[in-house]
Image (spheres, grey):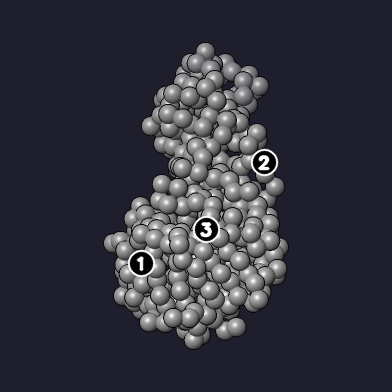
């Protein structure tokens, strides 16, 4: 059978693109190197798939040009995704910060996507693309010992995070073969490894709300749960800031973001000590590592203004420079990818190669924690599929 479009990748973005391309009348062949489609979708959100977020905006994404995402996000808002899934009878639940999950299992969403593939879409798994050419207005994709031909191609191969799930940088290599620049991938949504001489080393298991920031331009701060591990820091606050962090720069941590330690100390009376005041608010092991015990045992009334300020700074402005992150094997996503300067944001079509389209994590657009990456898969996949199918 002859095809109009070859789609590389059977994840959420590739399946979405194929569905919408077929709606436009295109005959589509989906090729995926895995033996089963949608493996990462089944694992996302603890198996319940953090499918989208009520509050999606370009500022929730990182890349050389996060504004590239704006047209697709405007065209496919969260309400569109929620309406489709609710009409399909998939029970959803909303958690803190607008995060939307399946009530039961992400398998329901994957089955829904596979069920929407019409007969004009052929899904072939176990087909690893090893090469791609564009000659005479047609693409030739080499897979195993076979070759597939079509006038259009959608690259939806994902990124190299979670290699244990089969993820790799094959899509980036194919994009380079076709002349596209690739922003080097780096792990994000990933725990940090701290230096061995960090004063807070050895606090593994402690979890508490904290605010974490870094010095990267445009970086927001995140107030969420922070978890000490045997290697360093994890938890939502750490994973979020990893999207903006760059090697060699410090993290700044506020361990009491909703309180003012200076005012607490000033308001203390009688024989109160900094230790007795702060022990009601912070874990004892953290206090012992964070503060000078000789100072925390003294009466607050005996402390100078300089000593009180130093105590407040230790709690609110702790600074540490991570050695590194735990890398792509522990990362939930990879920043970097195909340079969006070479892609039309209105159609996801290449500006360099007519008939070539991109969607999902293969592009240099990566969302923070909370459903933003799956939403990007739905939005960019929709735009790419409609545009490729209508050509």
Label 2, on which residue? 215
Percent x, y for residue 144?
Answer: 45, 60
Q: Residue at x 50, y 83 (%)?
A: 26
Question: In the rendered view, would you say 306 is above or below 364?
Answer: above
Q: Tell us which disc is closer to us: 3 or 2.
A: 3
Query: Mark number for residue 130?
Result: 3
Residue 251 in sight: yes
How many residues crowd around disc 1 within 10 Å: few (fewer than 14), some, or many (20 or more)?
A: many
Q: Tell us which disc is closer to us: 3 or 1.
A: 3
Looking at the image, which residue sits at the far top?
294
Structural distance between the alpha carbons of marks 3 and 1: 26 Å
How many residues crowd around disc 3 within 10 Å: few (fewer than 14), some, or many (20 or more)?
A: some
Percent x, y for residue 43?
Answer: 37, 54
Q: Tell us which disc is closer to us: 2 or 1.
A: 1
Horizontal side of 372 relative to 285 (left or right) equals right
- Dot 2 falls on a residue whose secondary structure is loop
- Dot 1 falls on a residue whose secondary structure is helix
Label 1, on which residue? 110
Between 138 and 226, the one nearer to me in the picture: 138
Q: Residue at x 56, y 60 (%)?
A: 131
How many residues crowd around disc 2 within 10 Å: few (fewer than 14), some, or many (20 or more)?
A: some
Residue 382 in sight: no
């Amino acid at each position: 059978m002859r095809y109009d479009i070859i789609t590389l990748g059977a994840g959420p973005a590739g399946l979405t693109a194929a569905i919408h391309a077929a709606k436009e009348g295109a005959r589509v062949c989906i090729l995926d190197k895995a033996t089963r489609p949608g493996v990462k979708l089944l694992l996302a959100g603890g198996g319940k798939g953090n499918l989208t977020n009520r509050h999606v905006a370009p500022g929730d994404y990182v890349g050389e040009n996060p504004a590239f995402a704006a047209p697709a996000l405007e065209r496919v808002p969260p309400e569109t995704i929620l309406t489709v899934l609710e009409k399909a009878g998939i029970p959803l639940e909303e958690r803190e910060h607008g995060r939307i999950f399946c009530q039961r299992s992400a398998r329901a969403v994957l089955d829904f996507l596979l069920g929407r593939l019409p007969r004009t879409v052929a899904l072939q798994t176990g087909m690893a693309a090893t090469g791609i050419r564009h000659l005479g207005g047609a693409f030739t994709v080499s897979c195993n010992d076979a070759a597939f031909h079509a006038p259009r191609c959608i690259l939806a191969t994902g990124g190299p995070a979670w290699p244990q799930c089969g993820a790799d940088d094959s899509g980036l290599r194919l994009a380079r073969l076709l002349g596209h620049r690739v922003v080097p991938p780096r792990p994000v949504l990933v725990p940090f490894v701290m230096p061995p001489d960090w004063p807070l080393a050895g606090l593994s298991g402690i979890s508490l709300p904290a605010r974490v920031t870094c010095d990267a331009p445009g970086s927001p701060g995140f107030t969420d749960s922070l978890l000490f591990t045997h290697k360093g820091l994890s938890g939502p606050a750490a994973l979020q800031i990893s999207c903006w962090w760059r090697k060699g720069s410090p993290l700044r941590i506020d361990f009491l973001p909703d309180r003012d330690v200076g005012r607490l100390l000033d308001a203390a009376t009688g024989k109160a000590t900094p230790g007795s005041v702060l022990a009601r608010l912070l874990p004892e092991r953290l206090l012992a590592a964070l503060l000078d015990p000789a100072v925390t045992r003294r009466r607050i009334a005996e402390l100078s203004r300089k000593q009180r300020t130093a105590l407040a700074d230790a709690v609110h402005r702790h600074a540490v420079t991570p050695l590194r992150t735990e890398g792509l094997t522990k990362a939930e996503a990879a920043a970097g990818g195909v340079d969006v300067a070479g892609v039309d944001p209105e159609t996801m079509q290449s500006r360099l190669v007519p008939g070539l389209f991109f969607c999902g994590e293969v592009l240099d657009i990566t969302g923070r924690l909370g459903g933003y990456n799956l939403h990007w898969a739905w939005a960019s996949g929709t735009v790419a599929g409609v545009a490729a199918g209508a050509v």
